[in-house]
Image (tube, grey):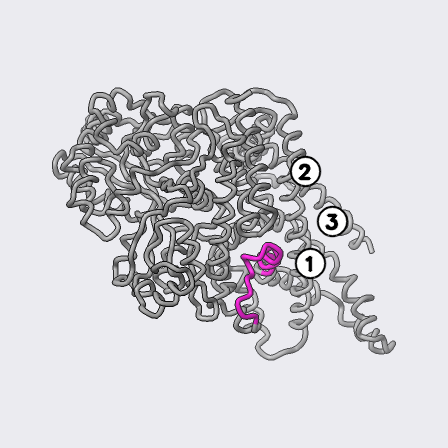
Amino acid sequence: MKRFASRLLAGAAVGAFIAPAAMAQELNIFWAEWDPANYLQELVNDYEAETGVIVNVETTPWSDFQTKAFTEFNARGSAYDLIVGDSQWLGAASEGGHYVDLTDFFVEHDLGNIMAPATVKYYAEYPGNSGKFWAVPAEGDAVGWSYRKDWFEDPAEMEAFKAKYGYDLAPPETWAQLLDIAEFFHRPDEDRYGVAIYTDNSYDAMVMGVENAIFSYGGDLGDYETYEVEGILNSPQNVKALEDYKRLYSYTPPGWSKTFFVENNQAITEGLAAMSMNYFAFFPALLNPATNPHAENTGFFPNPAGPDGDQHAALGGQGISIVSYSENIDEAYRFLEWFIQPEVQKRWAELGGYTAHAATLESEEFRNATPYNEAFYQTMFRVKDFWAVPEFAELLTSANQRLYPYVVGGEGTAEEALDALAADWVETFKKYGRTE
Amino acid sequence: MADVMTRLEPDTRAVARGLSDMTIRNLFIIPTIAFLIIFNVFPLLYSLWQSFTDFRASTTAPANWIGLANYRDLLGDEFIWRNFTITAKYVLISVSGQVVVGFGLAMLLNRAIPMKGLITTLLLLPMMLSMAVVGLFWKLLYDPSFGIINYFLGLGKFEWLADPQVALFAVAIVDIWMWSPFVMLLSLAGLSAVPKHLYEAAEIDRASSLYTFFRITLPLVAPILMIAIIFRTMEAFKTFDHAYILSSQPTTELIAIRLYKMAFLEWQTGMSSAFAYIVLIMVVAITNIYVKYLNRAKAR
């Protein structure tokens, strides 16, 4: 019995020495629960085959993603080695010390030139133009539009549209055309509606929807370097953009007051709307006949241009960062080195991930791979994003409080809403000492 | 304390090991007290301290003492007052609805009706469901295009959740549907405890049913009904799940939703602690008023 006990103790001691080495053979990546996370799991299986290191992609629903990630950060937890985090988190996660500074890695691998410029600017760098990088662009994404090709190509509809508006019915190239087409197809008596847009104000959905109008109308949310807001956020072009977003809301299906990506895809799959705003990452489901009975008749177009020809879209997508509290930081670096290789990025795109790798994005193969890749490619060079400061969530709350009552509730005017929001943001920046 | 303590028999093993009554009492009580201190008292006091700081859990920056600034900012914030007003309206609509429906159902079930047990069980089902699930399926029931509510009420495409003026009522209706059975259950217990001879005496005196209700039934059930109201008011103040799922209208942003956003989306930890204390004080104050009435009703 004594001999057995001593052997057991010896075994436990050996196990204790081996355990850390064995743990380094496993990496945990945290992301939101959606299709690209499944594609990433497929991709990292190749890494395991090559290196023997097991990589798990752990997910949580979008609604819980930010809360769960920051709860883990705040606890200085080492549950996750890497995180595919939202672009807005860069400020909070870098200033909070939660992300490893990847500037040297970025420079060493020339990622500033290898990745699409907008993805470097918005997914990786913080503060803006500082030359400090905290993430490797992983999943590029932006807002695009899907539409019902069969409705657009119906000869009777085309004739009626031309008679009413004086030009051919086709995917809109401008916001003015978008509004005309939405109005044209809005027929509540026939259970057919003009358009589906984002209206959920729980987090960033509605604000991103409004951004699509603001950016294409030539406006901005403020000066991201000086934190100046007054006169920029409430500029005349932003007022017009917000008015037109509200007009679009009047052409949405009934009850369209808390909608995000799920509902906007449903607008197409259930044959409710002629056009629907959504992130490109959610478009694969629209091409699948199992999930979309109208898959054959679904087309795609990029966010249209504004009155002066500006054409931008709200940025989605995420960069992948190393968590400071990881016990496997060296292995995490090795994983990133593997991930940025051109052939891995190509495979990532083949699996359905939206690569930010410029050469892969520009290749004919990628652009012709799906009906929406060309629109995605065009959009990724024209994206703009929300503030990435640590207090971004407070800015979002103010935006939701000011914009939603106007857009959905019909309270006040666009000018009043934006003036009030500008005043709120000025106060917030003052509170955090960014402006005097 | 000495009365409730059981003295050990001299030949028990504890006595044989030399454990005194006091030691045994401490062995039972100290872990519970330690648990309460670690998980209840300490967080309560720690969050109270945080409410006077600018602490943000999302950063590594130290917490700075800012005195009453958080409380001052919160009480001067127009949106916070709007949240309080919305919550007060919601509590009033929801709790009064639950009392009317719940007590009404209890009155009906207090009679001799066939399959009373089965009906009571079926009526209790809503409160056994998850609030998140309830929120999700009521969202479908309210849908203007295919929702069954508009179909049965012949309301066409009436927008229950998209109309800012109606959304709060829609959320309160869900709460009434879910929690009226709770009020019904307590009321039923109260009603069945009313002595039958009082009704018989009233009948002999030819008292009207209205008179019997207001002079016999209600006064005798009032204490237990008041307990139901206290519980439901406290719960209604904390409503989050189904309100969050059903609507994003600013007119349905209850204090629990605003508190959640402040604490876990904006990570304003100090400010949200202060907010939680304001809510706590309000709930305690309102509960105290109810308890006062409860004691008065009992004394009668």
User: Residue B290, which numbered label?
Assistant: 3
Q: Do the residues labelled 1 and 3 touch (CB within 8 Å)?
A: no
Query: In the depicted view, which residue is nearer to us: A104 or B68?
Result: A104
Q: What stretch is highlighted in magenta?
A: B155-173
Question: What separation in Å lies between label 2 and label 1 (alpha carbons)?
Answer: 22 Å
* Residue A26 pos. (x, y %): 22, 34
Question: Which residue is under mark 2?
Answer: B281
- Outermost residue, right direction? B205
* Prevailing SS of the magenta stretch: loop
Q: Mark 2, mark 3: which one is toward the viewer?
A: 2
The three-letter amino acid code for the residue at tag 2 is Ile
Q: Is residue B89 above or below residue A230?
A: below
Sort mark 1 into few (<14), some (14-19) or many (20+) by Cα contacts within 10 Å: some
Sort mark 2 into few (<14), some (14-19) or many (20+) by Cα contacts within 10 Å: few
Question: Which residue is under mark 1?
Answer: B96
Q: What element carries label 1?
A: helix
Question: What separation in Å lies between label 1 and label 3 (alpha carbons)?
Answer: 14 Å
Decide which of tag 2 and tag 1 comes sooner along the chain. Answer: 1
Tell me whether marks 1 and 3 sit on the same chain.
Answer: yes
Left or right: A316 with respect to B26? left
The three-letter amino acid code for the residue at tag 3 is Tyr
* Residue A120 pos. (x, y %): 30, 30
Decide which of tag 2 and tag 3 comes sooner along the chain. Answer: 2
